[in-house]
Image: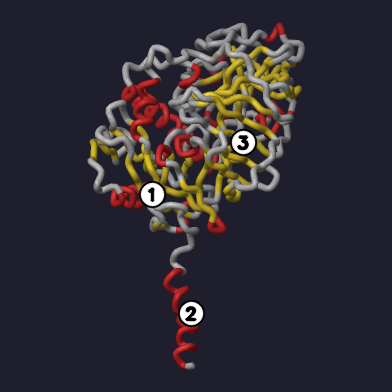
Amino acid sequence: MGFLLYALFSLFFISPSVSSSRTLAPEPSKTTVLDVSASIQNTINIFSSNTKMSLFNQQEKETTSSELTVELHSRTSLQKTTHADYKSLTLSRLQRDSARVKSLLTRVDLAINSVSASDLKPLETGSEFKSEALQSSVISGSSQGSGEYFSRVGIGKPASQAYLVLDTGSDVNWVQCAPCADCYQQADPIFEPATSASFSPLTCNTKQCRSLDVSECRNNTCLYEVSYGDGSYTVGDFVTETITLGSASVDDVAIGCGHNNEGLFIGAAGLLGLGGGSLSFPSQINAKSFSYCLVDRDSESASTLEFNSTIPPNTVTTPLIRNHQLDTFYYVGLTGLSVGGEQVSIPESAFQIDESGNGGVIVDSGTAITRLQTDVYNSLRDAFARGTKDLPSANGITLFDTCYNLSSRGNVEVPTVSFHFPDGKSLPLPAKNYMVPLDSEGTFCFAFAPTASSLSIIGNVQQQGTRVVYDLVDSLVGFVPDKC
């Protein structure tokens, strides 16, 4: 009897003390397989002569959904690369990505310090529209240089089709417009406002005009300007137009009609802002939810951007958190990271927003590589390096400090990296979402990077192949693997 009581005591009181330090749900698998050969082949296919150069003139496919749905394409499927090899393409991507992150962090810092874009310079009013004055000293905003994903959207009545950069880190929708004072080259014809029956300029006292970070008034017509951290910008008239996604149209959407534009938008006609601010497309159409699935950026496959669609029952959800200092970004409740089924030692405060609005974790479609606070990144990288110590190493480069020479391997088994969320929920990542090719010779790198900022960013490389759902009614962000 005494032994039985001791056994029961041990079961209920002693055992939990051993396991209580592990609050994460068990990993489905401690390791996952990276298909090295397939990844290398994808890097070669981009440069093959039979690669489809462009889908810009491709007609819209019919959708079986009654919701607002539009096709989503990677940059690779839209425009053949001009780079000499995959390594130079990768370095270019990383350079654009660094510019993107730098400008995001600048925007957050400005918001937290209660500095708006209009505080950065005096606004001049007058009968003449001087775009140079509007853009010269504005430094807030997010860079679109790393925009890797595009949607086909109809502008006006009748609809003129154009590819727009998809961006959850921006609110203002805009398209290049004729007449052009300065427009960059795009694949589709420049939008002609004179041909649209639904084109309507906004006056200066409208709510939409007053919601802009930077605006000016000319003859009671609202002028807008958005400047991005990589030197890109757009300046023009702020108007309402009809926007068509697939077979569905929405009237009176506020968009920028840009007559003076500069940037690295790579053939796109403008930008579709999916942020949380009042001028974003989801906010303007009062969307209950929206979702996207980002295909592999080296793939020619297409996926969809959907609004108000049903959220799958197997969705891994986490709270959508709002930063009272900045409503554009989608912050999520991330509680931890694991490598090979083992929790990485990370302070609980590392992923939280503090009272001043610093810190937290955002999900961003425009940032490529996930950024983590330096100490958090070091812990994650070291755990991964311990689990891959038998793999031959290679020299790191730019953002990547942990690389491997896998040229002699067809596939390799690597530790599973997982994101963890409240209530024991976890999202294991496919190996190709964190082991990415640097070149076509078999060099692969661990695709996370450190940041000196307290803000962490879940980038699109880690989102690839996963449908990301933004439930704007119940304030949830969900992840559904293999739903492209």
Residue beneath label 2, please? 13
- Quarter holding the C terminus is top right
Tell me what residue is drawn at x 43 percent, y 40 percent: 370
Image x and y of residue 274, in percent = 61, 32
Residue beneath label 3, please? 291
Tell me what residue is drawn at x 45 percent, y 75 percent: 15
Residue beneath label 1, please? 31
Image x and y of residue 174, in percent = 61, 21
Residue 37 picture quarter: top left
Image x and y of residue 109, in percent = 49, 40
| Residue nearest the observer in this picture, 111 or 156 | 156
The secondary element bearing badge 1 is classed as strand
Give the Cα separation between the discs numbered 3 and 1: 29 Å
Residue 194 picture quarter: top right
| Residue nearest the observer in this picture, 87 or 94 | 87
- Of marks 1 and 2, the one in the foreground: 1
